[in-house]
Image: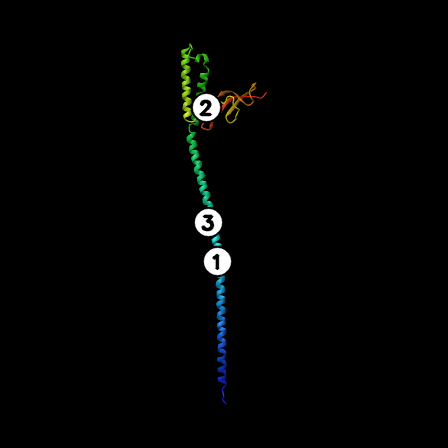
Amino acid sequence: MRWYSADAKQDGASDAAKPAAGGEEANNTKADAKAADAGAGAGAADAAKALKKTLEEKDKQISHLQGLYRRALADAENLRQRTRKEIEDKQTFAIQKFAKELLNTADILAMALDAVPEAERAGASSNAHLKNLYTGVSMTRAELLKTFKQFGVEAYNPINEKFDHNLHQALFQAPMPGKEPGTVFQVTKVGYKIHDRVLRPAQVGVVRED
């Protein structure tokens, strides 16, 4: 029969307990690793969400800036067109004031021609001086109107036309049998346009309804 001391028994118990302690430590290490993996996964998910939000904000900023850029381009184009139109108008209507001052001269020449009787304008007129004067005044007025036309100024006579307040200035109204009310039956002064703009409205008499 073998005898064992109490110390030997204790050493044996300690040796038996060592594998159990080693297994517990391994389990704790695995648990820590899993926790670390879980924490890393959560951190990555949070980082992805933050990145997505940042990208969305950047996209909004880019879209806003693109809108501002397009509006700036449109405003610049509108300004360019307005400036070009203003320059063209200034060039087109530069002589408007000067031409308007000359209209009275054209009116006076027309009245001088109208003052000569029809009989004195004919070739058989006995008053050669009056005939020559009439011819000279007529040529002067024709040359003036020709110069007007070169610069876009033209006369218009609205006799028998429907009255238009944009083109005509009514000086008086009178009933005229056989004529439609609102019709121009007399022109005291012809109108003038410079290109498509009224330089002076025609001064007219209009048929009044009875």
Q: Secondary structure at mark 1?
A: helix
Sooner in the amino-acid sequence: mark 1 or mark 2: 1
Name the amino acid, label 2: Ala
In the rendered image, which residue does mark 3 sit on?
Answer: 62
Q: CA distance from mark 3 to mark 2?
A: 59 Å
Pointer 1: residues within 10 angstroms few (<14), some, or many (20+)?
A: few
Q: Which residue is mark 1?
A: 48
Which mark identifies residue 155?
2
> Residue 72, which numbered label?
none
What residue is rendered at 44% in x and 12% in y? 120
Q: Give the class, few, some or many, for how many residues have Cα within 10 Å of label 3's Cα (few <14, many ≥20).
A: few
Binning the other alpha carbons within 10 Å of mark 2 as few (below 14), some (14 to 19) or many (20 upward) gives: many
Q: Residue furthest bottom?
A: 1
Separation of disc 1 and disc 2 at Cα? Answer: 79 Å
The vertical placement of 168 against 67, above or below, is above
Could you tell me the amino acid type at mark 3? Ile
Instruction: Kindly state the secondary structure of the residue where label 2 is placed.
Output: strand
Look at the numbered disc 3 and give the secondary structure of its residue: helix
